[in-house]
Image (cartoon, coloured by chain):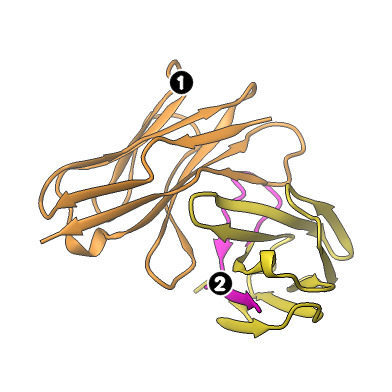
Amino acid sequence: AQSVTQLDSQVPVFEEAPVELRCNYSSSVSVYLFWYVQYPNQGLQLLLKYLSGSTLVESINGFEAEFNKSQTSFHLRKPSVHISDTAEYFCAVLNAGGTSYGKLTFGQGTILTVHP
Amino acid sequence: DVKVTQSSRYLVKRTGEKVFLECVQDMDHENMFWYRQDPGLGLRLIYFSYDVKMKEKGDIPEGYSVSREKKERFSLILESASTNQTSMYLCASSTHVPPYEQYFGPGTRLTVT
C-alpha cells in the first residue's frame, strides 16, 4: 500500500515571497507523482506531474517540484507567489506498475494563503 | 476542452433519503472515480469503475453504491443518507493507460440534515 503525507496543513505567506509545500510518500514500487490545485469553490486541476526522466518538473504558472527518490519526497516550490495562488494544494501518488486502474492516493492537502 | 460535469453544485437532503449524484464526462475515458473530500483528510476514494458495468470498492465504500450503465456516466448512490455523509463529493475520469491523468468535476456539496 502507498501513502502520502503533506507536512503542513496551512502555509501563510506574503505576496512575492518564496514558498515550499512539502510532500512525502511511501511506496514499495515505482510511482507517478502529481500535484493538484483546488481554487475556492472549484474542482481539482492538475498542476504538474512526474512520470520519469528529469526529476525537476515545472508548471506553466511558475511552480516547480523535484522528485527525490532517496528521500521519497516531491516538494512543490515557487520563488515568488501571487495573491491568485491562494488555494488548496494536494499531492498524490499512483502505482506505476501492476493493475492500479489509475487509482490515486492523495495527501491531506495544504492550504496556501497569500497575503498582500 | 475536456469536461467532467456533476449534476448539482449544492444539495440538501434529509436523513434516510435516497440520494443520487450524477457525473458525466465527454472524454471517452474508461476509468471513473468518486471521492469525498473532508477538511484535513484530503480526498478519499469511495468507488471507481474501469469499464461499463464494472466497479470496484475504494477505501471508504460503506453506505454508498454506484452505477455505470453507460461509458460517459457514473452515478453515486446513498441508499439511506446519514448526517456523517455530509461532505464534498468529487467525480473524476481518466484514461486506462499510463499516466492515468485524472480530470475532476466541480464537486457537489451535500448536506444531510
Q: In which quarter of the image is residue A40?
A: bottom left
For image coordinates 81% across by 80% down, the residue present is B18
Q: Position of residue B23 (x, y in %)?
A: 68, 75
Which residue position holds label 1?
Answer: A69
Identify which residue, B91 or B18, lies in the foreground.
Answer: B18
Disc 1 element: loop
Between B9 and A82, the residue placed more toward the observer is B9
Q: Could you tell whether B59 is left or right of A26 in the image?
A: right
Q: How crowded is mark 2: few (under 14 residues within 10 Å), some or many (20 or more)?
A: many
Query: Outermost residue, top direction?
Result: A70
- Numbered marks: total: 2
Q: Is mark 2 on a helix, strand or loop?
A: loop
Q: Which numbered dot is residue B19?
A: none
Q: In this view, does B106 lie above or below B34?
A: below
Q: Is residue A92 visible?
A: yes
Chain appearing in orange on the rendered image: A
Residue occupying the point 33% across, 48% down:
A10
**What is the drawing colour of chain B?**
yellow
Front-lying residue, B62 or A49: B62
Q: Which of marks 1 and 2 is in front?
A: 2
Residue A35 vs B106, above or below: the answer is above
Which stretch appears magenta? B93-113
Q: Quadrant of residue B74?
A: bottom right
Q: Residue at point 63% right, 69% down? A: B86
Disc 1 with disc 2 on a shared chain = no
x and y percent of residue B47 in the render? 76, 57
Q: Distance between the residues labelled 1 and 2?
A: 33 Å
Q: Is residue A49 found left or right of A60 in the rendered image?
A: right
* Residue situated in front as seen by the camera: B85 or A80: B85
> Residue type at mark 2?
Gly
Residue B107: image tag:
2
Question: Which class describes the residues within 10 Å of circle 1: few (<14), some (14-19), or many (20+)?
Answer: few
